[in-house]
Amino acid sequence: MDISLNVNGHRHALSLDPRVVLLDALRENLGLTGTKKGCDQGQCGACTVLIDGQRVLSCFVLAALATGEITTIEGLAGEGEPLHPMQQAFIEHDAFQCGYCTPGQILSAIACVHEGHATDEDEVREYMSGNLCRCAAYPNIVKAVLAAKSDMAANA
Ligand code: FES
Ligand code: FES
């Protein structure tokens, strides 16, 4: 079927099998490999993207039904532009090791802050619990989210 995806501010016309999920359309059809495939069954959060600002698991969404504005990790900061405060905070707080979970962590964390679910360490842990990190970088991820929250508020 013919579909149209709005990704990072650009509209893409694609012809896909209706069973294709958004994660595969992003990676295989659009070459946006920043979105990672971990479990492919809704359990790890590695595939998290934003649709109209809400975090979604792209392995669980049919591409044909993804009608909103999709943001992937590639869309947070353009070539030569400053990083998003959450990206910067992950670097400054050493919030990753292998980096495989990081794109999903960052997008989920941005939504977590916008949802108002980043008031303290416990709340960040709770509302980021859908994003698993095999390297167990959790303490520094929590620090990064809380630090970025202040920067995001200052830049709002
Ligand atoms: Fe989607 Fe794991 S790849 S939740
Ligand atoms: Fe390796 Fe999270 S940094 S899985």
Image: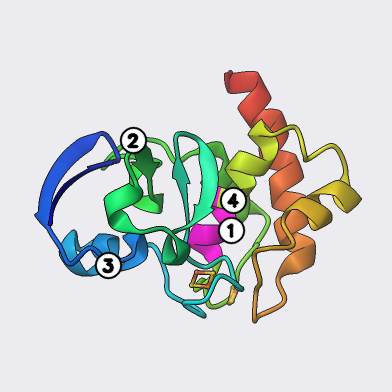
Boundaries of the magenta span: 102-107
Q: Which mark lies nearer to you, 2 or 4?
A: 4
Q: Which mark lies nearer to you, 1 or 2?
A: 1
Q: Earlier in the sequence, mark 1 or mark 2?
A: 2
Q: Is residue 106 magenta?
A: yes
Residue 48 coordinates in the image, percent (x, y): 50, 58
Q: Residues within 10 Å of mark 4 (few under 14, many from 20)?
A: many
**In the picture provided, is 120 more to the left or to the right than 106?**
right
| Residues marked 3 and 4 touching at CB (< 8 Å) | no
Whether ligand 2 has any atom under 8 Å from the Cβ at mark 1 is answered as yes
For label 3, the residue is 20
| Residues marked 2 and 4 touching at CB (< 8 Å) | no
Quarter occupied by the C terminus: top right
Quarter occupied by the N terminus: bottom left
For label 2, the residue is 81
| Residues marked 4 and 1 touching at CB (< 8 Å) | yes
Q: Which mark lies nearer to you, 3 or 4?
A: 3
Q: Is residue 6 magenta?
A: no
For numbered disc 3, what is the local secondary structure?
loop
Residue 132 coordinates in the image, percent (x, y): 66, 71
Residue 114 coordinates in the image, percent (x, y): 65, 32
Q: Report the disc number at residue 25.
A: none
**Structural distance between the alpha carbons of marks 2 and 3:** 32 Å
**Structural distance between the alpha carbons of marks 4 and 1:** 5 Å
Residue 57 coordinates in the image, percent (x, y): 50, 59
For numbered disc 4, what is the local secondary structure?
helix
For label 4, the residue is 108
Q: Could you tell me the amino acid type at mark 1? A: Gln
| Residues marked 2 and 3 touching at CB (< 8 Å) | no
**In the picture provided, is 9 more to the left or to the right than 137?**
left
Q: Report the disc number at residue 105.
A: 1
Residue at figure coordinates x 53%, y 78% from the top left: 98
